[in-house]
Image (cartoon, coloured by chain):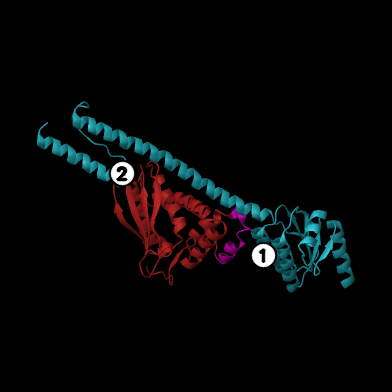
Chain colours: A cyan, B red
Amino acid sequence: MTQAEVESSVHEILTVLTQVAAGDLSLRVQTNEAPESPVGALALGINGIIEAWRESEVKARKIKRALEDKLGTIETQAAAIRELSTPIMDIWDDILLLPIVGVLDTRRSAEVMSNLLDAVVQKQCKYVILDITGVEVVDTSTADYLIKVVRALGMLGSRCVLTGLSPAVAQTLVQIGADLSEVTTLRSLREGLRHCLTSIRNER
Amino acid sequence: MDNSTAGVTLLTGFVFDVLNEYTAMKRTCTPVFDLARDLDPSRPGEWCSIELYNQVCDWIERNIGPSSIRKAGVAIGSRVYDMIVAQGGLKSPAPLTMLQALRHMANEVAIRDPKKRGWEILDSTNASITMRRTQTFNCVLQEGLLVSLVERTGVAEPDVEHVRCTRRGDEFCDYKLTWL
């Protein structure tokens, strides 16, 4: 090769590399040199690197796409689960029931409060039964939330009945000194419903 | 960037395009369905304020999640592709042709902005296009929409990089679309 041909080849290689660096991985170094010649071998090596880079980028993008898709699904499903986890039921005239199952953390407690208050305003009910038979653990913040829910319901003109306290939960509430004096607490949902019906009957 | 939305309106069909992605979650998404309660889904060609559209998208991003609204953008982008191809009589459009058509549709047909803001194409190469949004929009949804439009043109492994973002303090949202 002449000096001019070498310089032209190097220029071609640098042009391709600049565009590849800018993200165009479809480009390859074009050369008429034999693969065993220095310039031909260099072009072959560079093209191999670009191809490997492209393959790696293809894999990375496929993974990224799959993760983004899954994350979108997870977010949507998490919202659906949150919705299902606070099923507010209109079980009788003037009585709403909210059974709570599982862990009542801060976020869920806030959602319970928000959804319940909306439902109370919408239904204009007099009693709300919060059944926590399915709650195995409560902590100070959960107890605080329960008290806040009761107070907020009171401000809207509804009374709250807490049912289904397990011995462990009752023990915890006592240990942490939760003040449940404003709440009617009963052992079972059955007793809670009976209490509400009797109270409504007596009010009439 | 001029963030004002005063006097900016868009076709109500776009609002329902977003809401349709969440019809199975109507209870969770009650606030957004309430926002759109005065709109008539049987009249997608009517106009509503862009502010309402942004409120719907922003609520979903905050309360359901950014990946969810991005995924909604992907689904919407695919429908926008079909609409552009059908209305424009395009056959196998290249990415640049498609994004030029999007710019035309957004700036001239589907959104009315007294200040003539919308999409701009800043730069394009054989393997990339950089788009700029000069109008206030939910930018995460736009990511999904853009990548979906480019993907439908048939190029390999398209990706979008949100290179500049008004939420990060940049003046405009710029999106670099690349493919392999």
Residue A170 shown left or right of residue B113 in the figure: right
Q: Quadrant of the N terminus of chain B?
A: bottom left
Element marked by disc 1: helix
Which residues fall within the magenta stretch?
B23-38
Q: CA distance from mark 2 to mark 1?
A: 51 Å
- Residue drawn at (27%, 45%), measured in percent from left and top? A19
Give the crowd class for mark 1: few <14, some 14-19, many >=20 residues within 10 Å.
few
Q: Is residue B41 visible?
A: no
Q: Relative to the observer, which residue lies in front, B17 or A44?
A: A44
User: Residue A72 location, x and y as percent?
Assistant: 53, 50
Please tell me whether residue B24 belongs to the stretch shown in magenta: yes
Q: Are marks 2 and 1 on the same chain?
A: yes
Residue that badge 1 annotates: A114
Q: Is residue A56 visible?
A: yes
User: Residue B84 location, x and y as percent?
Assistant: 40, 52
Identify residue type, mark 2.
Asp
Q: Relative to the observer, which residue lies in front, B76 or A12?
A: A12
Label 1 resides on the chain identified as A
| Quarter of the figure with residue A197 | bottom right
User: Residue B69 location, x and y as percent?
Assistant: 51, 55
Choose the circle earlier in sequence order: 2 or 1.
Answer: 2
Residue that badge 2 annotates: A24
- Residue drawn at (22%, 35%), measured in percent from left and top? A30
Q: Relative to the observer, which residue lies in front, A38 or A128?
A: A38
Tally of marks? 2
Please tell me whether residue B123 belongs to the stretch shown in magenta: no
Label 2 resides on the chain identified as A
